[in-house]
Image (cartoon, grey):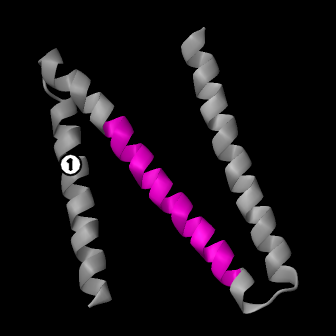
Amino acid sequence: MVRRIVWIFSIAGAVVLAGITAMLFSGQSHIRVPAIAALVTFAAVILSYLGGIEWGLALSESAGTESGATAYSRSALSRSTVRLVARIWRSGQEDSS
């Protein structure tokens, strides 16, 4: 059952990505410009989903033992949070200049 759900989501994501990519090849700018925004939004959603998986894996490792895994998970969560904040800050700096 889980494999079926994974395949459904994978195919749905591929269809969305193919549709957005097809819109990028349009010669009309009123179709292409929203497609670029849609592609950026789609990429942000996928990256946030993958980040959530990383956090989940780090937390599940710390649930098993309270020694080294806890230190690893805190370190992994801290690194991923710092990277995200740095990217957001950098993109804000680029937009303001």
Q: Viewed as shown, does residue 13 lie left or right of 69?
A: left
Image quadrant in which you'd find residue 7: bottom left
Q: Nearer the viewer, residue 35 or 71?
A: 71
Out of 91 and 17, give the one closest to the viewer.
91
**Label 1 amino acid?**
Ala
Label 1: how many residues lie within 10 Å, few (<14), some (14-19) or many (20+)? few
Q: Is residue 61 left or right of residue 57?
A: right
What range is drawn magenta here?
39-61
Q: Circle 1 sits on which residue?
A: 18
Q: Residue at x 64, y 82 (%)?
A: 60
Q: Quadrant of residue 78?
A: bottom right
Q: Position of residue 73 (x, y in %)?
A: 75, 71
* Residue 71 rendering spot, x and y as whole percentages: 85, 73
Residue 34 higher or lower than 81, as above or below: above
Depicted 54 relative to depicted 2: above or below: above
Q: Identify the residue at image location x=31%, y=30%.
A: 37
- Whether residue 36 is in magenta: the answer is no
Q: Secondary structure at mark 1?
A: helix
- The residue nearer to you, when weighing 64 against 27, is 64
Residue at 38% across, 36% down: 40
- Residue 84 on image: x %, y %: 64, 44
Majority secondary structure of magenta residues: helix
For the C terminus, which image quadrant? top right
Q: Is residue 86 left or right of residue 19?
A: right
Count of marks placed on residues = 1
Relative image position of residue 14 (x, y in whole percent): 25, 58
Question: Measuring 30% from the left and 77% from the top, which residue is drawn there?
Answer: 6
